[in-house]
């Protein structure tokens, strides 16, 4: 017999989703730190535009980090919260001392590409688990991040 948690989801599937969401959380935290770093260190003629855009992105990422952690808690899991956990679970590259405009934007595209891979796996798993809350969250993240990738690639004068 399947054991359900208090929100009506299979306990084992909720545990698996929590684990995968922790992986997403770790990657989002690295992405967030990358955004802070490029916001602080950007230089050049596009400074004013990019400094503002990077602040917008890291402010949004900070909100998303909280939402992901709260979803993990909702599923009955415990959000990872140490830098050690994040570095072990993250696939997003760490951007160190990046101050040039194109390199900064390329880091954002690379980071979002990694986040999208994880989110698509979670989307499939949450669909199988009949977990509409996680499914809706992933769908919203994917839609928003695909648009950001498109805009960043357009800025770089590259195609998707």
Image (cartoon, rainbow, N blue to C red):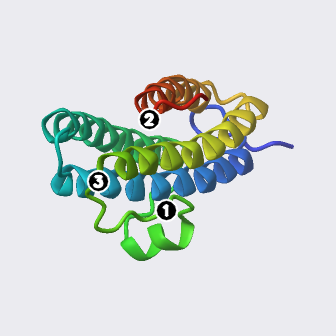
Left or right: where 125 falls relative to 92:
right
Tag 2 secondary structure? loop
Choose between 7 and 81: the one closer to the eye: 81
What residue is shown with label 2? 156
Quarter of the view holding residue 139: top right
Q: CA distance from mark 2 to mark 3?
A: 13 Å
Residue for point 53% across, 56% down: 22
Q: Residue at x 40, y 52 (%)?
A: 31
Q: Is residue 15 left or right of residue 89?
A: right
Residue at the outermost bottom position: 84
Mark drawn on residue 78: none
The residue at 29%/53% (across/down) is 100
Confirm or deny contact between disc 1 and disc 2 (CB under 8 A). Answer: no
Which quarter of the rendered picture does the C terminus lie within?
A: top right
**Residue underneath mark 3:** 100
Q: Residues within 10 Å of mark 2 (few under 14, many from 20)?
A: some
Considering only vertical position in the picture, is 9 above or below 111? Answer: above
Rendered image: mark on residue 93: 1
How many residues crowd mark 1 within 10 Å: few (<14), some (14–19), many (20+)? some
What's the distance in space between the residues labelled 1 and 2, CA to CA?
A: 19 Å
Whether 54 is drawn above or below 86: the answer is: above
Mark 3 element type: loop
Alpha carbons under labels 3 and 1: distance apart: 17 Å
User: Which callout, 1 or 2, points at the residue further toward the start of the chain?
Assistant: 1
- Point out the tag, 3 or 1, that comes first from the N-terminus: 1
| Disc 1 element | loop
**Of discs 1 and 2, which sits in the foreground?**
2
Judge by depth and name the residue closer to the eye, 8 or 126: 126
Image quadrant where one finds the N terminus: top right
Image spot of residue 35 (x, y percent): 30, 50
Percent x, y of residue 30: 40, 59
């Amino acid at each position: 017999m399947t054991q359900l948690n208090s929100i009506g989801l299979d306990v084992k599937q909720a545990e698996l989703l929590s684990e995968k969401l922790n992986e997403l959380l770790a990657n989002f935290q690295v992405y967030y730190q990358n955004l802070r770093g490029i916001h602080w260190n950007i230089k050049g003629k596009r400074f004013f535009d990019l400094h503002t855009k990077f602040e917008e992105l890291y402010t949004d990422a900070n909100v998303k980090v909280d939402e992901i952690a709260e979803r993990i808690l909702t599923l009955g899991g415990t959000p990872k919260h140490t830098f050690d956990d994040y570095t072990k679970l993250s696939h997003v590259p760490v951007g160190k001392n990046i101050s040039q405009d194109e390199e900064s934007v390329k880091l954002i595209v690379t980071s979002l590409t990694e986040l999208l891979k994880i989110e698509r796996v979670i989307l499939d798993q949450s669909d199988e688990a009949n977990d509409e809350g996680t499914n809706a969250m992933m769908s919203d993240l994917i839609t928003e991040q695909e648009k950001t990738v498109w805009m960043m690639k357009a800025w770089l004068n590259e195609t998707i």
